[in-house]
Amino acid sequence: MTTLTEVHEHGPLFSEEAAAILDRYSQAAREDIAQEGVNRIHARLTEVLRHNTGFYEAHIHTERQVDDLVITDTPIAYGPWLEGNGSRNFPKTRFRGYHTFRLVSQTLDEDAGDIAQRTLDKGYIEELNL
């Protein structure tokens, strides 16, 4: 015996307007997470840099690459050295780096869901309840 099931997608959740709202939310959540990462990097650098002139921190920003945002320190040439993955780090010198981007990335991954939830709470659910 064969059973045929039909599914009819209709209503506000399946409208083009809902898809646009979800796209806007997705983009806003990515931007909020990336900005939180920049803020955390600035906070950590304030703690670890010995002679902070502000020059390095001024060059930390988000940058769009393909369909995503990344946090970068370009065009600073000594960024890899400060991070600890440059060619002039240990064992060539005693300096092992601050590992700021790596450490912030780990905590940001853990907190991304909470950050995205705060973004969602900014009114996207109300918009979907057409």
Image (cartoon, rainbow, N blue to C red):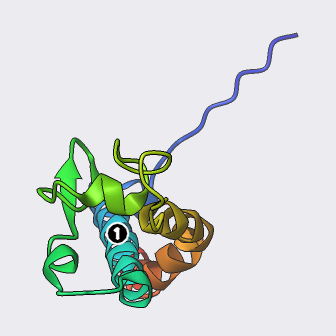
User: Which residue is at the front of the view, 18 or 30?
Assistant: 30
- Residue 8, position as x, y percentages in the image: 53, 42
Above or below — where is 9 with respect to 28?
Answer: above
> How many neighbours does mark 1 have within 10 angstroms: few (below 14), some (14-19), or many (20 or more)?
many
Residue 77 in which image quadrant: bottom left
Above or below — where is 37 with respect to 17?
Answer: below
Residue at image coords 22%, 78%:
57
Quadrant in which the C terminus appears = bottom left
- Is residue 24 in view? yes
- Residue 11, position as x, y percentages in the image: 44, 60
Residue denoted by label 1: 34
Tag count in the figure? 1
Above or below — where is 43 with respect to 129?
Answer: below
Residue 103 in which image quadrant: bottom right
Residue 21 in which image quadrant: bottom left
Quadrant in which the N terminus appears = top right
- Residue 30, position as x, y percentages in the image: 36, 65
User: Which residue is at the front of the view, 94 or 101?
Assistant: 94
- Residue 78, position as x, y percentages in the image: 22, 58
